[in-house]
Image (cartoon, rainbow, N blue to C red):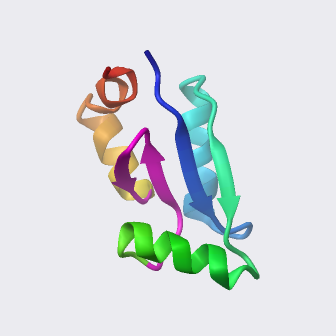
C-alpha cells in the first residue's frame, strides 16, 4: 500500500523542482504546499520539521527531509520500501 506524499515547496526552488521530477519519474502522486508569501504555512512547516529550507518532504508520517535526503534514499534503494511500507 502506497503512502501519501506531501512536499512543502517554493516556486523558484531548484531543489523543489528536482524532488518533483524524481517523484514523478517514479510515477508517484504527491501534494505540494507552497510557502511563498504565506508566513503561516512556512511557520507550520518549520514547526513540523525543525527546518527552514525547502523542499521538506513527508512520505506518510515520515519526514524524509529535503531533496538531498530524498535522493540519498533513492540511491541507497530505500525509497521504494519507505513508500510501499504498511
Q: Position of residue 2 (x, y in %)?
A: 46, 21
Q: How many marks?
A: 0
Q: Position of residue 6 (x, y in %)?
A: 56, 47
Q: Is residue 68 above or below residue 80?
A: below
Q: Position of residue 34 (x, y in %)?
A: 70, 64
Q: Is residue 9 above or below residue 4?
A: below
Can you tell which quarter of the image residue 83 is in? top left
Of residues 44 and 73, the one drawn nearer to the viewer in this rendering: 44
Q: Which residues are magenta?
A: 52-66
Of residues 53 and 35, the one drawn nearer to the viewer in this rendering: 35
* Residue at the extreme top: 1
Q: Is residue 81 left or right of residue 29?
A: left
Quarter the N terminus occupies: top left
Residue positioned 53% across, 69% down in the render = 54
Q: Position of residue 53 (x, y in %)?
A: 48, 75
Q: Is residue 70 above or below residue 65?
A: above
Residue positioned 58% across, 27% down in the render = 28
Quarter the C terminus occupies: top left
Q: Is residue 71 above or below residue 23?
A: below
Asked if residue 7 is among those painted magenta in the image, a careful observer would answer no
Residue positioned 39% across, 75% down in the render = 51
Residue positioned 37% across, 20% down in the render = 84
Q: Is residue 72 left or right of residue 30?
A: left
Amino acid at each position: 500500500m502506497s503512502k501519501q506524499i506531501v512536499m512543502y515547496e517554493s516556486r523558484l526552488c531548484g531543489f523543489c523542482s528536482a524532488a518533483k521530477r524524481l517523484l514523478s519519474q517514479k510515477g508517484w502522486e504527491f501534494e505540494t504546499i507552497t510557502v511563498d508569501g504565506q508566513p503561516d504555512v512556512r511557520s507550520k512547516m518549520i514547526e513540523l520539521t525543525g527546518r527552514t529550507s525547502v523542499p521538506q518532504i513527508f512520505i506518510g508520517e515520515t519526514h524524509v527531509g529535503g531533496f538531498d535526503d530524498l535522493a540519498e534514499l533513492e540511491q541507497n534503494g530505500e525509497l521504494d520500501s519507505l513508500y510501499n511500507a504498511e
